Image (tube, grey):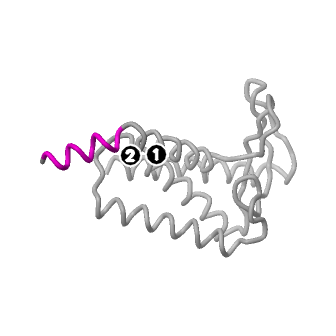
């Protein structure tokens, strides 16, 4: 239940900030800077990360929804307990869900976090969830998956 609450909070935060950006800014505008590290800039991304597959809205929507469904099925069938694995799945699910909402209801993903210190594509909270979740999943599989499998064999 805790993981579901965390996922919902991430989705709400993502959608709330996107709402504020859309309602208060024009596309391409920069509103303000955070610690001179990040600018809030409104971009409409019609692709995936780095604008890959731009214009493939249907495909990207299907991939996002399919990932969310697979994550839920995995959670129900496998019932993961390792905190790192649970955090990873939760973050990736919430990020995929948040961006799927945009793709399905707006026809594009709202990006708004622009790095001031390096040239990097504009992103959003959902993208952070997907990226951090994927990194945590790799860490889990490299360092902890063997421990979980050994524990399952002993039980």
* Residue 147 picture quarter: top left
Is 16 situated left or right of 86 in this image?
right
Q: Determine the residue positioned at 81% across, 31% down.
A: 116
Point out residue 143 in the picture as x, y percentages from the top left corner. Answer: 39, 36
Seen from the viewer's position, the closer of residues 36 and 145 is 145
Give coordinates of residue 117: x percent, y percent: 79, 28
Q: Residue at x 42, y 61 (%)?
A: 71
Residue 2 covered by magenta stretch? no
Dot 2 crowding, Cα within 10 Å, few <14, some 14–19, many 20+: many
Drawn side of residue 71 relative to residue 100, left or right: left
Which residue lies most toward the left here? Answer: 155
The residue singled out by tag 2 in the image is 85
In the picture, measured across the screen, residue 91 lies left or right of residue 79, that is right
Q: Secondary structure at mark 1?
A: helix
Rate crowding at label 1 as few (under 14), some (14 to 19) or many (20 or more) other CA atoms within 10 Å.
Answer: many
Q: Earlier in the sequence, mark 1 or mark 2?
A: 2
Q: How far, Cα to Cα, is label 1 from label 2?
A: 6 Å
Instruction: Quickly name the residue at label 1.
Output: 137
Are dots 1 and 2 in contact, CB under 8 Å?
yes
User: Where residue 61 sits: x, y (%)?
Assistant: 62, 70
Q: Magenta span covers which residues?
A: 144-154
């Amino acid at each position: 239940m805790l993981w579901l609450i965390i996922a919902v909070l991430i989705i709400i935060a993502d959608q709330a900030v996107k709402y504020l950006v859309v309602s208060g800014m024009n596309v391409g505008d920069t509103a303000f800077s955070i610690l001179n590290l990040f600018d809030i800039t409104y971009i409409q991304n019609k692709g995936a990360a780095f604008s890959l597959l731009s214009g493939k809205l249907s495909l990207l929507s299907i991939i996002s929804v399919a990932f969310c469904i697979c994550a839920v099925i995995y959670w129900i069938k496998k019932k993961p307990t390792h905190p790192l694995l649970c955090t990873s799945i939760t973050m990736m699910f919430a990020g995929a869900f948040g961006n799927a909402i945009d793709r399905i209801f707006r026809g594009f993903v709202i990006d708004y976090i622009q790095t001031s210190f390096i040239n990097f594509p504009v992103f959003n909270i959902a993208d952070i969830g997907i990226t951090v979740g994927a990194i945590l999943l790799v860490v889990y599989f490299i360092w902890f998956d063997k421990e979980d499998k050994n524990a399952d064999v002993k039980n």
